[in-house]
Amino acid sequence: MNVTDWNAIADAYSEIDDPEGRAVLTFIRDKLATLRPKRLLDYGGGDGKFAVLCAETLPLQEIVTYDPAPRMTSLARSLCADFKQIRVSETIEEIESGIFDVVTFNGVWMCLTSREACLDVLSDIARLLCSDGRLVASVTHPCFRTCKFSNYSTDFNTRDYFNDGTLFNVTIYDENRELHIVDTHWSMTAMSSQLNESGFVIENLYELPRSTNGSSQHDASLWLVIVARKL
Ligand SMILES: C[S@@+](CC[C@H](N)C(=O)[O-])C[C@H]1O[C@@H](n2cnc3c(N)ncnc32)[C@H](O)[C@@H]1O
């Protein structure tokens, strides 16, 4: 199984209709309205859609969006061009440490294929946050990978639940097209211990309510949102 080349599929990912994705992003935007950050970093921010959603609706002084895939950065540059408060960063090195009240991390954890890579990224996020800053991470819920959602399915096998780092195929689709990606599975235990090791304590877990999970199965949740505080 080849891991996803996000640079190569940036345009296709940006174009595909993804109502579940938007529902979780709106949910997180509403959490941010409560947390009232002045400075927000969207780490692995892709094409910048979430930065735009926040710029349009929240009184933020500064939003930085960073993604390592150059094509994602270039899409973000054009999408965010009209928003003075958004800065699109090409490299992580050009972002100042210790200044962000909140770092969002949407759909990125499943792109990281080793425990070391997860610890590196989470420690980097801790470095960028101010003291007491919050990490708000959204991941596809590791317990519901075998459920069918309206525009998302996987070939994950539940017997691999405790095999952290297992790769699985994901299909995202709308009426017109399909996109195939390869994601990495991290169990709840793995994510929680990675957070602890990188200097975070979990404050809240949200399993999105039925109205936003997009599932024909009413007992399933596509997205899990983790709010963690930097110690
Ligand atoms: C599923 S997309 C999500 C994009 C965006 N956050 C969203 O919610 O639409 C995953 C993104 O993670 C980025 N990514 C992959 N590895 C990363 C890493 N080590 N650090 C930061 N971002 C990474 C990819 O380039 C890609 O844009």
Image: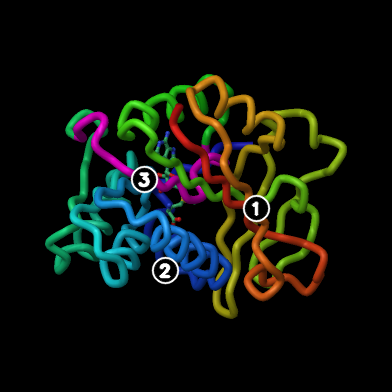
**Of discs 3 and 2, which sits in the foreground?**
3
**Numbered label tally:** 3
Give me the C-alpha separation between circle 1 and circle 2: 17 Å
Looking at the image, what colour scheme do you see? rainbow
Question: Residue 146 at what x, y percent from top left?
Answer: 80, 54
Q: What residue did someone put label 1 on?
A: 170
Give me the C-alpha separation between circle 3 and circle 2: 27 Å
Q: Nearer the viewer, residue 54 or 157?
A: 54
**Left or right side of 147 for 30:** left
Which residue is at a point 33% across and 26% down the rendered structure image? Answer: 127
User: Which quadrant would residue 103 be assigned to in this image?
Assistant: top left
Q: Point out the tag, 3 or 2, that comes first from the N-terminus.
A: 2
- Boundaries of the magenta span: 95-111
Q: Which corner quadrant holds the N terminus?
A: top right
Q: Point out the tag, 1 or 2, that comes first from the N-terminus.
A: 2
Q: Nearer the viewer, residue 149 or 125?
A: 125
**Left or right side of 94 for 42:** right
Q: Residue furthest bottom?
A: 175
Q: What residue did someone put label 3 on?
A: 102
Residues at marks 1 and 2 touching, judged by CB atoms closer than 8 Å: no
Tell me, yes or no, if residue 71 can be seen here: no
Q: What residue did someone put label 2 on?
A: 15
Question: Residue 20 at what x, y percent from top left?
Answer: 58, 68
User: Which quadrant would residue 86 be assigned to in this image?
Assistant: bottom left
The amino acid at mark 2 is Glu
Which residue is at a point 53% across and 39% down the rendered structure image? Answer: 109
